[in-house]
Image (cartoon, helix red, strand yellow):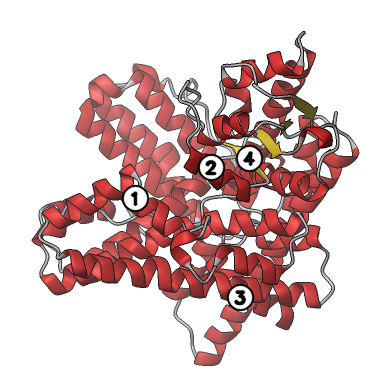
């Protein structure tokens, strides 16, 4: 076993700054750097990362004044780079010095367009590295070799191979591991859903244990384990909030007021599920009131009443109870149907809530606008293309959420395509590009881009290509991929678990890999 003396044994707190830096370098940093290049296991690497993180905390608490801001920053970056080196298996993928240098050059407008895009990719690599040196809560239970897809791919790109065949074999091995892990994530989501369904009182410890058992089987990374831990935390808090509301004295109407700030005008019914309360509304004024999510006294307009006629239910993002935000489902129904939930609507809205727990962001942060007004017209167009492409990825996330919810609710895939991609796109309820373009955010971005001298016509052209035309192709091809799984006998739960962990734009390739592996 690898062991190091404690900070107390070395009396680090009493040393001068120079002595501290020399002792830390000699006792910890140099030996750890040497170990990182050896064939040590993932658990050993995690223990060393934890030690470096403790060292950073110690320096911040005891040496920051003596080191000074710049001295501490340099020391902290040295610790970070060593953690990146460890998590990457002794391969230098990128360093903090390189990151800061590129950020400074971007801000000073000293990079070409190609270099700007390269710097953007480097910053995204840092996101991947940082998300994997963050240790899961129960990291000491990790006793297996981890597989971190993006880092493994970067290592292959940097590795020298004796022949093309050798590189192809390595890539084939990578793809096999990647596909296996993706299937493992899908299966784990299934395990958790089934465990919760079979035992609504299941403990947090039991759910965490299920995740770590799966992690051992499918080589989950730190980041993947953390996402599962966070999902379980959210579920436990939600379950407690639902239980608290259910146990409060009062009628359904009084609990409606607790959630939304006023008593309903019509009759309602509240059902309690493990993911959130499910409310049946028999009065359109009440449904509009919740649908708007403003919770003010403004009476519903005739246009709003007309719009909700096409809506059978919704998952509410806002309410007045903290623990139930993004956790309330509402069904629009008739008075005579109160007390009898519509199964399709119920399953659809439940899936929306479940997505809130398990789905992660499928889009990257849009590139900075800091240097946009300094670019030539040609480079501005390239930048806009990337900007709107990343914006479209956000819309893809919304569409994936809806597709999975409709699938759970029993809607046929062909009908889902008709709902999401109607012939008259301007009237589509799910026309995310239209809603964004007319939102406060969209109007603000548009105004800023025009102020940089970009022609409105060019803006419209690129926006339409990336956020409307390309989006429609992606949704259509994703639904075709979904139908392939249905045709091959996959049940709905397994399809949702598998595709829920894959960005919408990658559904076709994920299904192709699955069918050929």
Crowding at mark 4 (Cα within 10 Å: few <14, some 14-19, many 20+): many
Element under disc 3: helix
- Distance Cα–Cα, label 1 vs label 2: 50 Å
The answer to which of 326 and 289 lies nearer the viewer is 289
Q: Which residue is mark 1?
A: 438
Q: Which residue is mark 3?
A: 508
- Distance Cα–Cα, label 4 vs label 1: 22 Å
Disc 3 to disc 4: CB gap under 8 Å: no
Left or right position of 196 against 300: right
| Quadrant location, the N terminus | top right
Figure disc tally: 4
Element under disc 4: strand
Nearer the observer: mark 3 or 1; the answer is: 1
Crowding at mark 2 (Cα within 10 Å: few <14, some 14-19, many 20+): many
Nearer the observer: mark 4 or 1; the answer is: 1
Sequence-wise, the earlier of marks 4 and 1 is: 4
Left or right position of 385 against 394: left
Q: Is residue 37 visible?
A: no
- Distance Cα–Cα, label 3 vs label 1: 31 Å
Q: Which residue is mark 4?
A: 315
């Amino acid at each position: 076993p690898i062991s190091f003396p404690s900070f107390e044994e070395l009396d680090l707190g009493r040393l001068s700054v120079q002595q501290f830096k020399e002792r830390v370098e000699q006792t910890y940093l140099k030996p750890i750097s040497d170990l990182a290049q050896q064939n040590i296991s993932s658990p050993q690497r995690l223990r060393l990362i934890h030690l470096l993180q403790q060292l950073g905390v110690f320096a911040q608490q005891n040496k920051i004044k003596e080191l000074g801001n710049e001295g501490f920053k340099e020391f902290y970056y040295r610790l970070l780079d060593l953690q990146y080196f460890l998590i990457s298996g002794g391969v230098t993928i990128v360093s903090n010095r390189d990151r800061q240098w590129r950020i400074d050059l971007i801000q000073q407008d000293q990079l070409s367009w190609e270099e700007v895009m390269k710097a953007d990719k480097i910053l995204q690599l840092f996101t991947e590295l940082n998300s994997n040196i963050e240790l899961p809560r129960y990291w000491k239970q990790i006793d297996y070799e981890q597989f971190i897809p993006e880092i493994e791919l970067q290592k292959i790109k940097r590795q020298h191979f004796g022949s093309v065949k050798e590189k192809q074999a390595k890539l084939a091995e990578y793809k096999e591991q990647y596909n296996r892990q993706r299937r493992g994530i899908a299966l784990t989501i299934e395990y958790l859903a089934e465990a919760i369904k079979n035992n609504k009182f299941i403990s947090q410890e039991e759910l965490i244990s299920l995740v770590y058992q799966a992690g051992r089987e499918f080589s989950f990374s730190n980041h993947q384990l953390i996402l599962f831990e966070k999902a379980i935390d959210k579920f436990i808090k939600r379950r407690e909030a639902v239980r608290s509301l259910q146990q409060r004295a009062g009628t359904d109407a009084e609990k409606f007021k607790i959630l939304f700030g006023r008593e309903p005008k019509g009759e309602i019914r509240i059902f309690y599920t493990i993911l959130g309360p499910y409310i049946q509304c028999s009065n359109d004024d009440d449904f509009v009131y919740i649908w708007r999510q403003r919770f003010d006294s403004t009476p519903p307009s005739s246009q709003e009443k007309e719009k909700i006629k096409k809506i059978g239910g919704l998952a509410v993002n806002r309410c007045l109870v903290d623990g139930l935000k993004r956790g309330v489902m509402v069904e629009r129904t008739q008075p005579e149907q109160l007390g009898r939930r519509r199964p399709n609507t119920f399953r659809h809205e439940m899936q929306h809530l479940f997505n809130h727990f398990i789905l992660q962001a499928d889009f990257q942060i849009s590139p900075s606008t800091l240097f946009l007004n300094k670019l030539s017209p040609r480079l501005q167009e390239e930048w806009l293309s990337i900007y709107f492409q990343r914006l479209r990825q956000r819309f893809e996330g919304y569409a994936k959420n809806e597709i999975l919810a409709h699938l759970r609710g029993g809607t046929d895939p062909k009908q889902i395509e008709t709902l999401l991609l109607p012939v008259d796109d301007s009237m589509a309820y799910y026309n995310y590009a239209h809603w964004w373009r007319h939102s406060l955010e969209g109007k603000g971005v548009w105004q800023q881009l025009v102020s940089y001298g970009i022609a409105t016509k060019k803006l419209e052209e690129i926006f339409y290509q990336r956020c409307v035309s390309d989006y429609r192709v992606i949704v259509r091809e994703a639904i075709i991929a979904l139908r392939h799984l249905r045709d091959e006998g996959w049940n709905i739960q397994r399809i949702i678990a598998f595709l829920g962990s894959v960005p919408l734009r990658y559904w076709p390739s994920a299904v192709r890999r699955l069918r050929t592996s």
